[in-house]
Image (tube, rainbow, N blue to C red):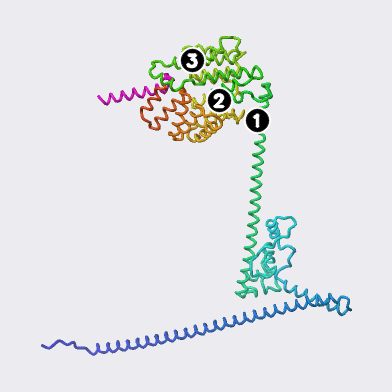
Amino acid sequence: MRNPVWELEPSDLEEEEEEEEEEGEEGVARGRAGKRSREGKKKKKKKEKRKEGRSRRSREREEKKRRRRKRKRRKKGKKRSKEDAGSESAESQSTSSSSSGSASEEAKSESESSAESSRAKRKAIAGPALPQRANVAGAAAATVAGGAAGAAPAEVNYGKALRQGEGAAIAQFVAKDMRIPRRGEVGLSGDAIEEFEKLGYVMSGSRHKRMNAVRLRKENQVLTAEERQAMTLARYEEKLQREEKLMAEFQAVVAEKEREAKAKGARRQSVVDSAGAMDVDELYSVRNLFWLGNYAAAIDEAQELVPSNEREQIDRDVFVFRSLIGQGNARQEDMNKLTDCDDPMPYLSRLKPYSKVIEQVGDQSSAPTDLLAVKMLATFLSQPAQREALLETIKDWLSDETIRDNQTLQLMAGLMFFQAGDTKEALRALRSRSNLEILALSVQIYISMNRVDLAQKELEELQRLDDDCTLTQLATAWVHLANGSSKAQEAAYIYQEQMDKTVASAALLNGLGVANMQLKKFGEAAKSLEEAHQKDPSNVDVLVNLISCYINDRKPAKQVDQAVSKLRMAAPSHPLLAQLAACASAFDAKAAALAT
């Protein structure tokens, strides 16, 4: 079979020819467009080459001009140096031939005028004439830097690449907040030139880029130097102000201390005058030893003392009897003998020297009120059965107008009521506000009532009377311990300082142990409390603190039980023993309930 062939009609042939003609025209057009683009690129490259050649030639011309200017400046410099040398030689020749005629005088005047003109040309700068001092800031800075009276003010260093006096001249315009003049600005003022520049005119002084760069660099140098100088002055003035403020504060503190010292001296003098004694306190050492708990040393010191009057003798006897009451004669071996006793209190009371006080004071009604009050305290501590009657008796004494103002009576009554747990009556008995021991006892009572704020007020009164007194320092430590661990370290410092001054007593060791317990130093606290227990085995406060320390330090139960048994012998009715018994019974009941 023959393959099919498409037959074209005449109309189809004509359309094909037209399409071919159109494609040919389009190809011609594209070729022309490509030729035009290539020609444009060639022209553009030629223009760039010509422009680059012109810029290169212009740079070469600028470089040639710069070299010519540099050579001219060198020639002018050499010419000026020659003129200066000629003028100096002319001056010397005219000076040597001063006796010659008028011709030589005319030559001299001409040489001097030429020399002055050359110097004026060298010193000529833009701007107004310089004063003797460059500026006020420079003179002030020189005064600050030098500090010597009559010294010449030092010039401000404006940096390098500046002519002589140029930096100072620019600084004058800066100080006056004026426009700094530029080269080429002739015939117009600075304000007028600035107005023209704002309108768009290009002035001769700002046309050259290099000159503008040099001008900006110089202005920045001057501004930086002025700012540095101003900052130096400002820092110096601030330093002076700080020093003046510190000096004023220091002077105020010194004046306040002087006033306090004078007031304290006046108070001490008034106390001495009211007591009728102008000499040194004879019982100073006895009091301090008693307050620190060194009762044996206080007794020995008092026995060696020879009182100068009857009042001093009564006060000495009071401290001796109170030291006997506070002194614990029970030794450790004696305390160990009481382990098997059912009722150790009678034997323990015999170990304490209460009987010595009662026997030595006696039943004499003519005895001083101070000694009778001390005897009543010894009876109150040694005979618990008579405490109610003794408290009623002391109340009657306090209501007696003839003896109720006796400070020793008030102190003993406060101690008795405090021991009985009646803090209200104790505070009522302590009426005197001028006795240090009464105020210290008030501090202890308020601390036991958890009223640290009132204890702080009593401490402030103590400090007002005598801030350096040993009893005031001890009361400060008590208040610190009552405030908690935040002040415990300061209390420890006070106790340690007192022990460094004297012998470490049981009272001081007990206070140091409590401070270390609040600081969570139970090991050091146990050492202090054990040493205090060795010094005074019957001290109830030491035993209570020792038990608490053992429990917090997780000591063995046997060691805790030994301390509890010693407390039971020393104070069978102590509240801590009742609390321990209640805890033990509650534990036993709970264990029995769980067992069933």
Which amino acid type corresponds to the residue marked 3 in the rendered image?
A: Ser
In the rendered image, the quadrant that contains the C terminus is: top left
Q: Is residue 23 above or below residue 260?
A: below
Which amino acid type corresponds to the residue marked 1 in the rendered image?
A: Lys
Residue 26 appears left or right of 50: left
Separation of marks 3 and 1 at Cα, in angstroms = 41 Å
Task: Please tell me which of labels 2 and 1 falls first in the chain.
Answer: 1
In the rendered structure, which segment of residues is drawn in magenta? 569-596
Which amino acid type corresponds to the residue marked 2 in the rendered image?
A: Trp
Q: Which residue is under mark 3?
A: 382
Q: Which residue is under mark 1?
A: 264
Task: Please tell me which of labels 2 and 3 falls first in the chain.
Answer: 2
196, 243: nearer the viewer: 243
Q: SS at mark 1?
A: helix
Q: SS at mark 2?
A: helix
Residue 157: % across, % down: 66, 64
Residue 336 appears left or right of 177: left
Residue 587 in magenta stretch: yes
Q: Which residue is under mark 2?
A: 291
Residue 272: % across, % down: 67, 24
Q: SS at mark 3?
A: helix
The answer to whether residue 367 is seen in the rendering is yes
